[in-house]
Image: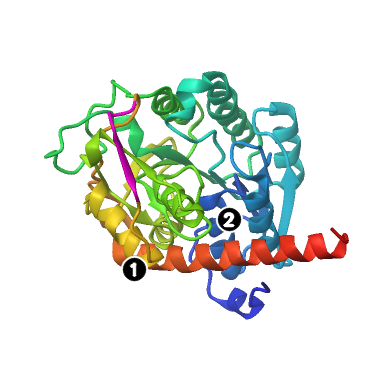
Amino acid sequence: MPIDHQAQDQTPTVSVSGTGPVLVTGAAGFIGMHVCTALLERGFDVVGLDNLNTYYDPSLKSARLKRLAWYRKFSFYKLDISDQLEVLKCFEYERPSLCVHLAAQAGVRHSIKDPFSYRDSNLSGHLAILEACRQVETVEHLVYASSSSVYGERPMESKGFSEADPVSEPASFYAATKRACELMSTSYSNLYGMRQTGLRFFSVYGPWGRPDMAYYIFADRARLGLPIDVYNGGEMQRDFTYIDDVVEGILGVCAHPADPGENRILNIGGDEPVPLMEMIACMEENLGVILEKNFLPKQAGDVLTTHADISRIRNMCGYVPRTRLEEGISRFAEWYRSYYAFQSAAQISLVSENGS
């Protein structure tokens, strides 16, 4: 689908005093594609990095990249961020003014099955980005993805999780790697005076989302007529955050850079925890189905609740989540039906062309 390039005439809201592009890692990912789009529509040159791994269907990542390819100011490197030499070469050639580092091995449960992939992408990859930002003096600000999972297990009645809360007991290895990245960044800010902002995302959802997330899995199961697995008897809640609100928060952070030598940590959440069963009911309404449910025990690595205290980012840049779950799920369901209808039509056309 072509993208309207007239939108690029909007006044940029991101604070970059240099002349270099904005470099976005994980550009073919869910949040990465949306961030790249928002920057491009504001007139910025954007350099995207992604290794297009097979953790989930690479065709979805390719489809995201095709959307970005419509923009003349977008360029792309297929590159693994754990390859420190190639990362440095890219930074030295492109000389970015701002780096938005979103690439990582995602997934709480997958980190139990394959912890070494998290070592490579999350730890070695984050270090490679830190070193590139340190060595290439054009980089004014590093904004990087952390996760609400660093907060660990909390009671269901917990108040909003504050950035000042202790985060010393991660419930998963994924969470441990994300907390380690925050500490690595703090050391680089202290040692080299780097400006950095770490963003703890809370259950991001929406069109073009990640197929390993619960809401997407439920949609897949509905499409295939299969039951869904509901863990801990459905007794969980999440601070769901719609993708457009997340992007606005990221842009707001970029417009208000950290101070020299500061690694600030900020929550980006919806500020309204929703019970899991309520989210499932919302999915059923928008997909027009009643899902058969397998109620199962709590999974290792899962937490009962998440709830972002967003007062810090609100006070800093006026961040206010505007999309309620009902509206966000409706938009996701509309995209999901359209995307998979198109995929099915494309497969039928391909079969027909091959004479099968």
At horizontal 29% and vertical 54% (from top left) the residue drawn is 279
What residue did someone put label 1 on? 327
At horizontal 87% and vertical 59% (from top left) the residue drawn is 354
Seen from the viewer's position, the closer of residues 147 and 63 is 63
Residue 118 in picture, x, y percent from top left: 53, 25
Q: Which residues are magenta?
A: 292-299
Task: Say whether residue 149 is left or right of residue 63.
Answer: left
Label 2 and label 1: CA atoms lie apart by: 21 Å
State the mark number for residue 33.
Answer: 2
At horizontal 53% and vertical 59% (from top left) the residue drawn is 34
Q: Secondary structure at mark 2?
A: helix
**Earlier-in-chain disc, 2 versus 1:** 2
Task: Say whether residue 136 is left or right of residue 262.
Answer: right
Please rate how many residues cluster around mark 1, counting C-alpha atoms within 10 Å: few if below 14, some from 14 to 19, many from 20: some
Depicted 35 relative to depicted 135: above or below: below
Q: Secondary structure at mark 1?
A: helix
**Can the viewer see residue 125 in this picture?**
yes
Inspect the image, locate mark 1, and give the three-letter code of the amino acid beneath it. Glu
Q: Quadrant of the N terminus?
A: bottom right
Q: Quadrant of the C terminus?
A: bottom right
Inspect the image, locate mark 2, and give the three-letter code of the amino acid beneath it. Met
Task: Say whether residue 235 is left or right of residue 21.
Answer: left
**Can the viewer see residue 322 in this picture?**
no
